Image (cartoon, rainbow, N blue to C red):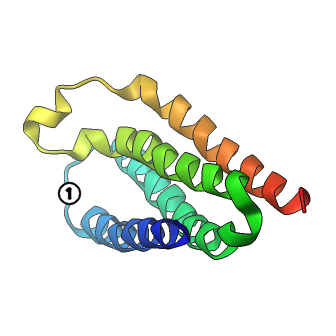
Amino acid sequence: MERLWVGFGAIAGASTVAMAAYAAHGLGGTAPAVIANVGSAIQMQGLHALALVATGLWARRGGVLAHLAGAAFVLGLVLFCGTLYQPIAPGWARTIHVGFLAPAGGMLLIGGWVLLGLSALRR
C-alpha cells in the first residue's frame, strides 16, 4: 500500500510539470482570473505530490492514519485541483459546473495533513 501513495505522488508530480508547461505556453487569451486559479492549482498539486511521496515513505510506521492521509490527499487533489483546472478543459468539460467541489477538496487536503500529523503523534 505504501507504494500506492508514492506512485500517486509521482503521477501528481509529473502532471504538475505538464500543467505548468501548458499554463506557461498554452493559455494565451485566457482570463487573468482563470490563469490565477490554474496557478493556485499547480502550486497545490506540486506541494501535495511531495506530501504523497512522504506519506508513502512514512505509511509503514504511521499505520492506518497515514493511509487515510494518503487517500485524503489523492481525493483532495482530484476535487480541488480538478475544479480549478476545469475552465481550461476541452469544450464539453467546461459546460459542467463543478466549482462547488473545490471547498470539499480543500478540506480533504487539510484533513490529510491533520491525519498525517496524528499518525506521527500516535506512536
Q: Where is residue 37 in the image (x, y as percent from the top left)?
A: 43, 45
Disc 1 residue type?
Gly
Height in image: 45 above or below 71? below
Question: What's the residue at 12%, 44% (across, down)?
Answer: 90
Q: Which residue is drawn at 22% across and 25% down?
A: 96
- The x, y position of residue 103, in whole percent, is 54, 30
* Figure quadrant of residue 97: top left
Q: Where is residue 106 in the image (x, y as percent from the top left)?
A: 57, 39
Q: Residue at x 59, y 40 (%)?
A: 108
Q: Is residue 122 visible?
A: yes
Q: Could you tell me which residue is drawn at 19 percent across and 50 percent down?
A: 29
Tell me if 17 is positioned left or right of 110 in this view: left
Relative depth, front residue between 119 and 63: 63
Q: Mark 1 points at which residue?
A: 28
Q: Locate residue 26: give its quadrant.
A: bottom left
Left or right of 90, for residue 9: right
One can see residue 33 in this view: no
Front residue of this view, candidates 30 and 54: 54
Q: In the picture shown, does residue 45 fall above or below 78? A: below
Q: Position of residue 73 (x, y in %)?
A: 55, 52
The local secondary structure at tag 1 comes to: loop
Q: Residues within 10 Å of mark 1 (few under 14, many from 20)?
A: few
Left or right placement of residue 4 versus residue 93 in this view: right
